[in-house]
Image (spheres, rainbow, N blue to C red):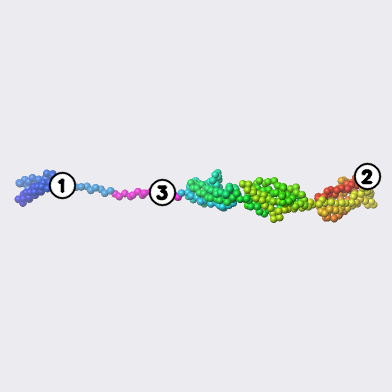
Amino acid sequence: MNRLAVVFAFVALTIVFAGCVQEKQWPASPTPFVASVTPSTAASLTPTPTATRTPTPTATAQTPTPSPSPSPAPSTTAPSCILTATPNSFVGPITNVVLAAAFKNLPSSATTATLKCFSGDVGQSVSIGSQGGAFRSCVYPLAPLGGTTYEASANAGGASCTASLTNGYNASAAPIISSVAATASTNNATITWTTDVASDGKVEYGLNASYGLNSTLNSSLLTSHVVVLTGLAASTTFYYRVWSCNSLNVCASATSSTGVFSTTAPSPTPTWSFTALPSSFTATLNAGNNWNTTQSITFLNTGNQALSGIVCSVNDTSIASAPSCPSTLVVNGSFAAGFTIQNTTSINGIYGLTLTFQATNATAQTSSGTVTIT
C-alpha cells in the first residue's frame, strides 16, 4: 500500500506541475512519462538513463611562430653639400681661386662631382674623396665695368650648392702705375713699371719734354711691363714717360722721379803698336850648328782699354816658330814677342815671313818681312 500511495502522489504532483506550466504559458513540454502500475505486481520503476556527455577535448597550446625582425628603415636624410671659395673676394684678374665642396649623405654610386667656376661654365668633373671633399682651381679674368659677382656651383648625387665670389675690379678707373725705372747703356735703354691691373704698355720718349717718339705698343694685358728702346745716340739724355691702358682703353701715364735717362759714352776702340818685323834678315848656322835666328818684336798697348785674348802666329811654322805672346796686355803695357828660325830647316833660300798679332777686343795687325837662310 505504501508503494501505491507513492505512485499516486507522484502522478498528482505531475498533474499540478503541468497545470502550473500551462497557466504561465511556458512553451509546450513533451508528454510526461507516466509509469503504469499493476496493482498485483510490485512494478519496478526503471529510471530513464541520463545521457553521458563526452567532454570536448581541450586544444593543445601551440608554440607561437616568432615574428621576423623588421628591416631598418632607409635613411631619409637628403644628400647635401657646402661650397667655399678661397679667396672669395679679389680684384681681377686672378688665377688661383680654389673651390672646395664638402658632400654628405651621398649615394654610394656618387663618386664624382661637377664643379663650375661661374654660371655658364661647362664645369669640371672631379673625384670625391673618402671624406666627401671635392676640389677645383678657377681662373677669373678682368671684370666688366663696375665689377661683377660670380656664382660657383657644385653638384653630385642629388646634392647641389653654390658660393658667391666678388671681383672688385672697376674698369672705369685708370690703371695705377708705379715703380717706373730706366736702365741705359751706350745705345739702348730698358724701361720697367708695374700697374695695379692688367694693362697694355708703351714708352714715349725724346730729347725734350715734348717727347715725339714712341715705342711699339705691347698689347698684352699685364701688370709687370718691360720695354727696350734701341738705336739710341750715345752720351745723350732722353726724356720719357710710360703709358698703360686697361681692357676698356682707360689709360694713365707716369714717369720716374727724374723723368729722364742718359745713355753712356761708347767704349773706345783698343789700339796697339809694335816694332816692325825686319824687312830682311839672314839666318846662318852658328858654331853649334844652330841657326842664329833670334828675333824680337815689341808690342805696346796705346789705347785706353786693356787688350785681351791676344794670339801671335806666323804664316809658315816650318820656317819659324810662332812668337810667344801673353794673353792680356794692360793699358800702356808692352811685351816682346820672340821667335826663331827652325833648326830643322835645311834648304837655303829666301823665304817670306808674316807675323800676325790679334786681340779679341782689337783689330788684328800683321807685319811681314823676309828671311834669308844660308
Give the residue at mark 2.
349
In the picture, measured across the screen, residue 312 lies left or right of residue 243, that is right
Question: Which of the marked residues, 1 or 3, is nearer the chain's N terminus?
Answer: 1
Q: Indicate the position of residue 5 as horizontal and vertical percent values.
A: 5, 50
- As helix, strand or loop, the secondary structure at mark 3 comes to loop
SS of the residue at dot 1? loop
Determine which of the numbered discs, if any, sits on residue 71 in the image.
Answer: 3
| Residue 267 showing in the rendered view | yes
Determine which of the numbered discs, if any, sits on residue 74 in the image. Answer: none
Looking at the image, which is closer to me, 166 or 243? 243
Q: CA distance from mark 3 to mark 2?
A: 123 Å
Q: Which residues are magenta?
A: 60-77
> Quick one: SS at disc 2?
strand
Within the magenta stretch, is there residue 74?
yes
Please give the name of the residue rendered at 82% of the width and 51% of the height, measured from the top-left corner.
270
Residue 120 shown left or right of residue 307 in the figure: left
What amino acid does circle 2 point to? Gly
Horizontal and vertical percent for residue 115?
54, 47
Picture disc at residue 49:
1
Confirm whether residue 338 shows in the render: no
Q: Is residue 222 left or right of residue 52?
A: right
User: Does the magenta portion include 221?
Assistant: no
